[in-house]
Image (tube, helix red, strand yellow):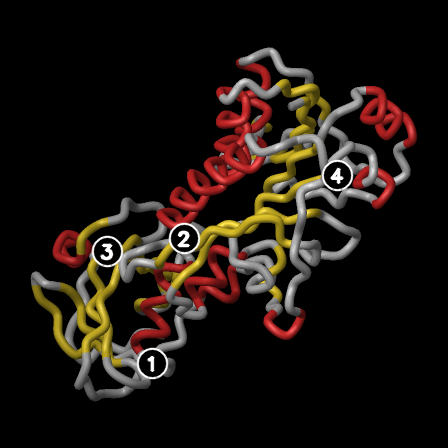
Amino acid sequence: MKIIFAGTPLFAATALEALFLSGHEIALVLTQPDKAAGRGMKTAASPVKMFAQKHELPLLQPASLKNQPDIEAHLASLDADAMIVAAYGLILPESILKIPRLGCINIHASLLPRWRGAAPIQRTLLSGDPKTGITLMQMDAGLDTGDIIDLEEIPIANSDTSQSLHDKLAALGAKCIVRLLSKNPDRRFPGTKQDEAGACYAAKLSKAEARIDWSANAEQIERMIRGFNPFPGATCLFDDIPVKVWQAIPVKDVTGTPGEVIRVGKEGILIACGQGGLELEMLQKPGGKVLPSAQFLSGFPVKSGNLLR
């Protein structure tokens, strides 16, 4: 098929690579403009742009697609069968949605209508959902409200972080879109309307959300630690010094003031929560490396009875 592809991060680049290797004609790649990133705030190309340049694919990086008649005319001139969209980050106006013969198909990282919006992977973990998956959706003018074309689910492991779940879903999304496009391309893909009663909004993450509230129960905090890994990292204060917690295990039958250090040892740092406790296993101080608790303690003394905030 002749495809226009729109996407920006690694999740999208995984799907673009799969489509390219499957022999589809990539008539154009759309990705967001280069942005400053990292400690040095150097301008960096998106993973989708890097793949497009490596394989000499036509590329455009508009800052917006709203009120862009020249871009719309160019897209129409390509006579594409479909536009495939994955974590693009820009709104597609209705006029653009109507251009490809088979419309625009979005690769969404949740089981719609569960978790519409910008951060479905993280919200899935934070909420303790037992499963997630990929939805292929016929895009319309709403926010992830289009008809469901295809859907495949996977279980969420107790050890999954946002990073590990992202990687699983990126691979699954690539597989699903290649499978869909291998079907009869001569008609619009049939879809099923979403059940609005099951819709939730997956708001973009904020650093303020990543501050640990020790009065919550241990299971909630542990999900938060996994949900904010790798960004922005669940944070607490040790003597007013912000420390990120990257891995922890819930422990039952722990009593104490929420945030109180109950025990310090080789196995970890046991902290009392609103209900139960957490054994902190991997931590990081500002500017330092992520370390197992035993190594972390050698340069950051923490004692039983200390209170974390």
Check the picture and name the quadrant holding the N terminus.
top right
Residue closest to the far left: 266
Where residue 120 appears, as percent x and y from the top left, is: 53, 57
Mark 1 and mark 4: Cα distance apart in space:
46 Å
Tell me which amino acid carries mark 3.
Met
SS class, disc 3 = strand
Q: Residue 217 bears which disc, if any?
A: 1
| Residue topped by disc 3 | 282
Sequence-earlier tag: 4 or 2: 4
Sequence-earlier tag: 1 or 3: 1
Residue depicted at 44% across the width and 42% down the height: 172
Mark 1 and mark 3: Cα distance apart in space:
19 Å
Mark 3 and mark 2: Cα distance apart in space:
16 Å
Tell me which amino acid carries mark 4.
Gly
Sequence-earlier tag: 1 or 2: 2
Up-down: is 90 above or below 68? Answer: below
Residue depicted at 31% across the width and 60% down the height: 245
Badge 4 local density, few (<14 within 10 Å), some, or many (20+)? many
Badge 3 local density, few (<14 within 10 Å), some, or many (20+)? many
Sequence-earlier tag: 4 or 3: 4
| Residue topped by disc 4 | 103
Instruction: Mark yes or no: residue 266 visible.
Output: yes
Residue depicted at 76% across the width and 50% down the height: 140
Up-down: is 194 above or below 61? Answer: below
Up-down: is 218 above or below 144? Answer: below
- The image quadrant of residue 250 is bottom left
- Circle nearer the viewer, 1 or 3: 1
| Residue topped by disc 2 | 162
- The image quadrant of residue 32 is top right
Residue closest to the far top: 56
Instruction: Mark yes or no: residue 42 visible.
Output: no
